[in-house]
Image (cartoon, rainbow, N blue to C red):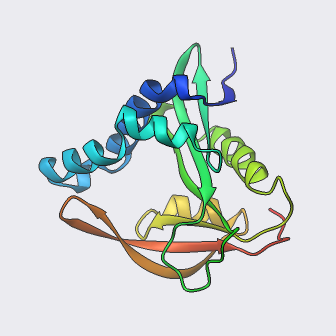
Amino acid sequence: MPPVIRRATVADAATLADLATRTFTQTFGHLYPAEDLAAFLGENYTVDRQRTILAHPGYAVWLVEQDGEAVGHAAAGPCGLPHPVVHPGDGELKRLYLLEHMQGGGLGGELCRVALEWLLRDGPRTLWLGVWSRNFAAQRFYARRGFQHVGDYEFPVGRVRDHEFILRRPPGQLA
């Protein structure tokens, strides 16, 4: 059966917490001391935190499922990035992750399309996202969708501060 993308509900909080922990650790876990990674995961990917996000009317999360197993997710909502031209009403792609064995087959592009369409459901607006400065594949992926580097910030993972890029896509830009 092909993978299915569906909107997550509050009932998916435990699944999302587990998947978010697995995908972040698989993608970036090697970059951090164990105690810093554990602190980050314990703050950001708890079941309670995911439940709060899933219940918030301004946010949306999607799960990718393959044969009944969650293998990817995306999250979108109001922009919270530290950039001086972010305006109320701007949207942000907050997360987009697939387990390694699901990458490279176009599923990430489809998941991104679903999230961006949701962000644009009420019409054109500026879209934002943050990406690790050394994640070159992700930067190329987002550039193909019209996002451009417009700023930098530090993303804390425990005591570690990652250099992140802020990417923006102006309203009305097609990708």
* 81 versus 115 height, above or below: below
* 90 versus 93 height, above or below: below
Residue 7, quarter of the rendered image: top right
Q: Where is residue 148 in the image (x, y as percent from the top left)?
A: 64, 76
Return the residue nearer the eye: 50 or 107: 50
Q: Where is residue 169 in the image (x, y as percent from the top left)?
A: 71, 72
* 79 versus 16 height, above or below: below
Return the residue nearer the eye: 136 or 94: 94
Q: Is residue 128 visible?
A: yes
* Count of numbered tags: 0
Quadrant containing the C terminus in the rendered view = bottom right
- Residue shown at 80% from the left, 72% from the top: 171
Q: Position of residue 83 (x, y in %)?
A: 53, 81
Quadrant containing the N terminus in the rendered view = top right
Q: Can residue 103 be seen in this view?
A: no
- Residue shown at 53% from the left, 22% from the top: 11
Q: Where is residue 168 in the image (x, y as percent from the top left)?
A: 64, 73
- Residue shown at 59% from the left, 23% from the top: 65
Return the residue nearer the eye: 34 or 123: 123
* 98 versus 131 height, above or below: above
- Residue shown at 68% from the left, 47% from the top: 109
Answer left or right for 80 relative to 17.
right
Residue at the limit of the structure toward the bottom, as seen here: 84
